[in-house]
Amino acid sequence: MLSQGGLSIWIRSIKVVWPINRNARVSRAVLNHLETSSCMTPGLGRMETASRHLGQHAIVIGGSIAGLLSARILAEFFERVTLLERDELHEPLATRRSVPQGHHAHFLLKGGEQIMEKLFPGLVQDLVDLGSVPVRAGLDIIVSGLFDQPRRDLGITCHCQTRGLLEHALRRRLDEQRNVETRWGCSATALSTDTPKRHVLGVTYRDHQVGTENSLSADLIIEAGGRGALTRRWLEDLGLGSPPTVEIGVDLGYTTGIFEIPEDPARDWKGLVVAGKPPEDGRGALVLPIEGDRWIVTLGARFGHYPPKEYEGFIAFTQSLPDTAIYTAIKDAKLVSDIHQYRFPTSVWRRYEAMEAFPERLIPLGDTLCSFNPLFGQGMTSAALQVESLRAALLGRIDQSDPLNGLSRDVLRRAAAIVANPWMQAAEQDFQYRETRGERPPPDETASRYMRHLAGVIHEDIEVQRQFHRVLHLLNHPKTLREEPICSKVAVHMREHPDG
């Protein structure tokens, strides 16, 4: 959730994108594309279907959200698809070893949910049948500390579940694609290329179950292996250099436990969010309902003041927050899981689209491209939007004689445009803390004043509040908050409350 106090970086994102490393060389054409491209999901009508295959074989590296969705897309355009996942799947709902953050709360924004439902019709009902809990934005989850708003039903219903359940539902749907094969316990170790290193031809991978090294050729490779950034390492190994990289040192640590939901007929909420106000207080906590009549409770803090892992300290942390609502909710509830910790030191955006040399037929997506501060829940939806842009690029090439030529650069530019807005939404909040590391954009008092008055309008007008939440859920572009009728309502608020 973004704060009321200063959204200048975010509102500026309507016009510009986040600066890349000063040493990077980026063409004006690339920047123009990023500035003008929409990053929101289009209308969710009937999907077009590829009329012919663009290649025989595609490989997806990583069974992440981005990887699972990419495999679904590629199944339309290639005769067969192979997904390589280094983990072995023993329990279908368990957290995979390669997803250490999987034990913690994940909130799927509506923009991401809609894309997943579009790719896998019936997925949302699958989630509900498996125990996912519907929540109404603005009404069922009470937020205090950051951007307090009136409780209203905004017409946006999301669904809460563990990361493991969401991945299980996606895998089950993907298994229905007959031309997709998943190879568990297989780690991609290297790329194979042509002699000029201009085209990727396949991968080498290790099968951990049998201990062998194998190779696969492919017409296209999607690297969705996560924050470890296989693509970056492989490009360095090939002598092509590293991408310009933007980093924000957020130094976040968080701790999570799962509790049984106690009976309370008077309870009128399904979830809680409590956060200290920057720049003094970098603590926060949230309670979300998950399958099995349970709450997942995640505590977070910055810059060394991390929540403790032992139970008594966990409970005491919630009591020390500015609002004790979470403490009251869980102090007598039964803990039914281990307590897990995770550190997230740095948000990282790798600007592959800005590289002078990038091989054809390799596309990194998801966390390997951009790893967001998890506090804001943007990663899964950003990945879904990136994959949707991949599909749009492939559809536009069906009638071309060499449809994969230039595809990598095209998709990477689209992905950068998608990443820009959620990146800046999170950065606005992160840079309110003095300890945050990274290149700070100059202050913009005009934008900050606009957003302060927008906050006032939101308290008065449910439609403006609804549009604000559509932007937070990556359904609408931030520029809609500067358009009519919202801008006129803000102007009136400015005149009536000149010191607001």
Image (spheres, grey):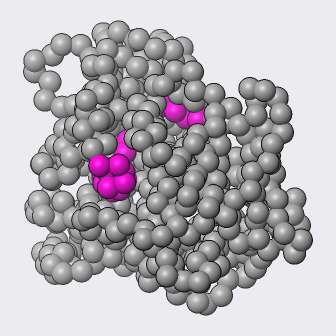
Viewer-nearest residue: 296 or 266: 296
- Left or right, 484 with respect to 217, comes to left
Pick the residue in front: 86 or 336: 86
Give the quadrant of residue 12: bottom left
Where 228 falls versus 28 (above or below)?
Answer: above
Q: Is residue 130 above or below residue 474?
A: above
In the image, is residue 111 part of the stretch drawn in magenta?
yes
Residue at figure coordinates x 43%, y 63% from the top left: 388
Q: Is residue 196 left or right of residue 45?
A: right
Q: Is residue 369 left or right of residue 397?
A: right
Q: Which quadrant would the C terminus be assigned to in this image?
A: bottom left
Q: Is residue 204 visible?
A: yes
Q: Position of residue 220 (x, y in %)?
A: 65, 63
User: What secondary structure do most residues of the magenta stretch adopt?
Assistant: helix
> Residue 140 placed where, x, y %?
19, 38
**For this view, does 397 lie left or right of residue 19?**
left
> How many numbered tags mark residues here?
0
Q: Residue furthest bottom?
A: 28
Q: Position of residue 414 (x, y in %)?
A: 52, 73
> Which is nearer the eye, 221 or 427?
221
Q: Is residue 390 visible?
A: no
Q: Residue at x 47, y 52 (%)?
A: 72
Front one among 120 and 231: 120
Name which residue lies at 81% across and 42% down. 214
- Whether 68 is drawn above or below 358: the answer is above
Residue shown at 44%/83% (left/top)?
A: 36
Does the magenta portion include 139?
A: no
Q: Which residues are magenta?
A: 99-121
User: Measured from the top left, where is residue 416 in percent x and y?
Assistant: 55, 70
